[in-house]
Image (cartoon, rainbow, N blue to C red):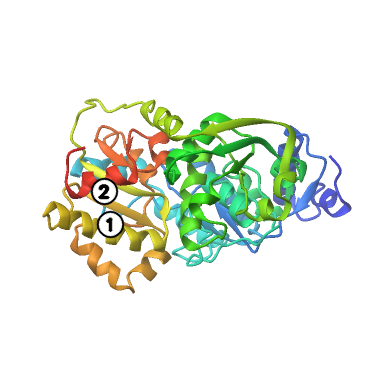
Amino acid sequence: MYLTPEQQAILDGSKGETLAKVMKTMVMYGDAFEAEKLVPVTSKYNHLVTSFGLKVMSPVYDLMQQLLDAGVMSGQKFSVDPRPLDKNVPASFLQKFVFNKFMYTKQDFYEDQLIKLGLMDKDAFTCACYMDEVGNTPKKGDVLSWAESSAVVYANSVLGARCNRNSGIIDIMGSIVGFVPYFGLLTDEGRKATWVVKIETTKKPEAQLLGSAIGMRVMEDVPFIVGLDKWIGDELTDEACTYLKDFGAATASNGAVGLYHIENLTPEAKDQGRDLIAEGAKEYIIDDAELERVYKEYPVIWKKPDAAPKLCFMGCPHMSLQQLKSWTDKVEAGLKEAGNDKVVIPTVFTAAPKVLAEFNKTEYAKRLKATGVITSYICPLMYMNNPLCKTVPVITSSNKLRTYTSARYYTDDEILVAITKGGK
């Protein structure tokens, strides 16, 4: 790997032993992927995936403390993934006991480390940091050092920034030293599409289901998607961005997609059109039957497959302000049709603290609360990591949550019926 004189000097210890170790880490990471050089991180803010104070993660806390003791600070302020706990989310006495005594025992300690290292502010905990309310929205062409998969794919695809699917801790290393290896999705060649996905459905495809189908087929490759603009338009409106947030999270978790292009919609697809498609690209056609096939093949890992749902989670990744408002209308209408006053299954909508703060300023917040729906800032995945929570029949319309936990996937329409009328 070629290093500039500045980079070589840091590696040689010109700025101290600790920063030399950080640089060595980034060089070794780049070598593993045959990167030819390091390039500067240019975004204003970073985002870290590791937000939870699990007791078993002592090496992370030790590493962070070494950085703090050496006076090595992040080169950028940063946001982090969601907190794992919220007393407002339903949990039994035993579940809470496990959370607080065996799992997230280092949460306060770790958050103090994050603040000292450069956390944007006390409410910068969300997997959807790119939302306007949060304030960590990269610009087109920015080079990032992020690791959260759903945020990486959104930044690359919807915002036109450049970031590889890094691992946790690599994200903060890149921010501290100010450089990341140049390979993969940072390069023009690496951003070319090796799949053409044709959407031939008779109605707007479910975002999470479509993303799942594409992710499982293309895996880590880059897809160029044709025909989706028919259903979500050719402008990045709030509604379109919300759709792409959920769609992208499913491609990244059900596969390993870090970038997708949508014809006539996403920035690079608008600029370059089909020139983004690499020679010899494979083809995948998605129609109604294909989405139905994918849905029916999801495994049900509940101990009792026909059990009645005990909890519903929405918001993995975190819901947008637009989603919170639209779902308020949906829940009210569903309850009215069913003749019910409140949701019949305990239901939690999760969103970034700053998104919830904006939502609470609207008349929708009071209306949603009246339906019995709980709003929270937590990460549903971290909640479901509790061994006692894994045995609870939880439903969700998040393919990310379905993939990583025992939660069972249903479409948005099916979720609405389940929480307002029952029967799932």
Which of disc 2 and disc 1 is earlier in sequence? 1
Q: Residue 88 occupies which quadrant of the picture? A: bottom left
Residue 110, percent from left and from top = 46, 52
* Circle 1 SS class: helix
Q: If the image is split into quadrants, where does the N terminus sit?
A: top right
Residue farthest to the right, as pictured: 5
State the residue at coordinates (88%, 52%).
5
Q: Amino acid at mark 2?
A: Leu
Where is mark 1, residue-wise?
Answer: 330
Local packing at callout 2 (Cα closer than 10 Å; few below 14, some 14-19, many 20+) is many
Lateral position of residue 280 relative to residue 418, left or right: right
Please say if 85 is above or below 215: below
Contact (CB < 8 A) between labels 1 and 2? yes
User: For the residue marked with disc 1, what is the amino acid?
Assistant: Lys
Viewer-nearest residue: 313 or 196: 196
Residue visible at 45% across and 45% down in the picture: 207
* Residue 309 visible to the viewer: yes
In this rendering, position of residue 278 left or right of residue 155: right
Q: How many marks?
A: 2
Q: Which label number is shown at residue 48?
A: none
Residue 123 versus residue 86 in the image, above or below: below
Measured from the top left, where is residue 395 in percent x and y? 29, 40
Asked whether residue 113 is in view, the answer is no
* Residue 70 image position (x, y, % from top left): 65, 55
Q: x and y percent of residue 205 in the render? A: 44, 43
Q: Secondary structure at mark 2?
A: helix
Q: Which mark is residue 416?
A: 2
> Foreground residue, 262 or 249?
262
Distance Cα–Cα, label 1 vs label 2? 7 Å
Q: Quadrant of the C terminus?
A: top left
Residue 301, quarter of picture: top left
Q: Quadrant of residue 194?
A: top right
